[in-house]
Amino acid sequence: MSFDVGTLSPAQREEIVKGQEPDLSGYMARTVVPEPAFPITRREGAYRKLGQNRTHASDGEGRSTKQRPGSPTPEGNGGVESLSYVCEHYKFKEGIDELTGMELETAIPIYSQLGLGATHEILADFERDFIEVVKGNGTDDSEDSILTMTLSSGEEFDDMTGSPITQIQKALRSIGSGARAVLGFDVAFALMRHPDVIGATEGGSKSDNTMVALQSLLGFFQSRFGVSQVYVGTQPIHDGAENWDFQRSYLHDGACYFDDGKNLERPTFMDLRLDDYEDRDKEMKFVRARFDADIVRRFKENSIALKNVLANPGAI
């Protein structure tokens, strides 16, 4: 059976690609992490930041502004520091032979689809780098290291006898009010099922409420902890070898991160860019996506990641 693709109706053309369009809405790194306030003109370098003035502390001792008249004025420990960055070069291409492309482009926006596929690949890799930072897996004393707090056995959020509210309160003491959170969906789901959270949000118990709604959990973070924004990662990926049976996993699983909303920055040498080119010898057309960026934190103390959050990761 054959047909002239040029005679397809818009509805028929839409049916051909239904379910095939890559969904890019689950990638949060470029939303959560803003660029610095000034342009980056080199792929690798450093820029200046105002140093952190640790109030009421000097050489491990308390300091006081109460001084005798005529005595020297005490001096703070603020200053200007450097923040180093190295923009990674992300690139990926999708291609199709020219004759097939000529046939398909009369029915569907084939080259737009290829561009979305290539974009999906590089954003997934950039998201993985973002998740490494918010999971507290950065190198010690590097520009991606943050504070971490490891939960002991019995304190995990999927242990119904633990107290996740207490653990979150401990973490937020280092950040203060107005914090924001990044959670993997498996972490959010464990909290939605935990009796501590059910009792605090709905006044019930595990016996009479199976779980709270996700929206109730987000509101609970805001009302109970003063968290200004909560991002829940829902981006699925294929977690298996190319051309093997589909194995779904989620990029953000296991993440439980808090910061002050200003600590992460995204130096970007080249923002997301698409271009196309031909291999005339092979009669192929390609669409390529490229991106050059890094993720750094301004101060180690202004971000914290909870580790060992789930006793049975992957079970939810």
Image: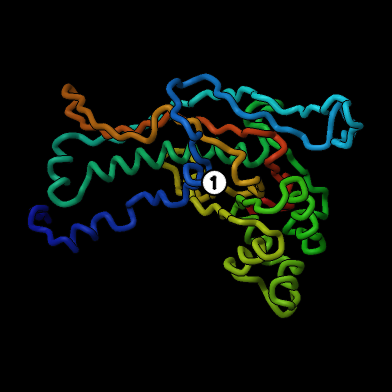
Q: Residues within 10 Å of mark 1 (few under 14, many from 20)?
A: many
> Quarter of the image holding residue 305?
top right
Looking at the image, residue 156 lies above or below residue 267: below
User: Identity of the amino acid at label 1?
Assistant: Leu
Q: Quadrant of the image for the C terminus?
A: bottom right
Front-most of residues 259 and 127 = 259
The residue positioned 10% from the left and 55% from the top of the image is 3
**Looking at the image, which residue sits at the far bottom?**
208
Residue 23: x and y, percent? 39, 51
Q: How many marks?
A: 1
Left or right placement of residue 85 versus residue 175 in this view: left
Residue 66: x and y, percent? 88, 37
The residue positioned 82% from the left and 55% from the top of the image is 154
The residue positioned 27% from the left and 54% from the top of the image is 17
Residue 201: x and y, percent? 69, 72
Left or right placement of residue 34 versus residue 132 in this view: left
Left or right placement of residue 239 versus residue 141 in this view: left
Looking at the image, residue 241 lies above or below residue 180: above
Secondary structure category for the residue under label 1: loop
Front-most of residues 304 and 50 = 50
Protein image colouring:
rainbow
**Looking at the image, which residue sits at the far front?**
70
Q: Quadrant of the image for the N terminus?
A: bottom left
The residue positioned 72% from the left and 44% from the top of the image is 307
> Quarter of the image holding residue 167?
bottom right
Residue under label 1, please give it. Answer: 251
Looking at the image, residue 48 lies above or below residue 312: above
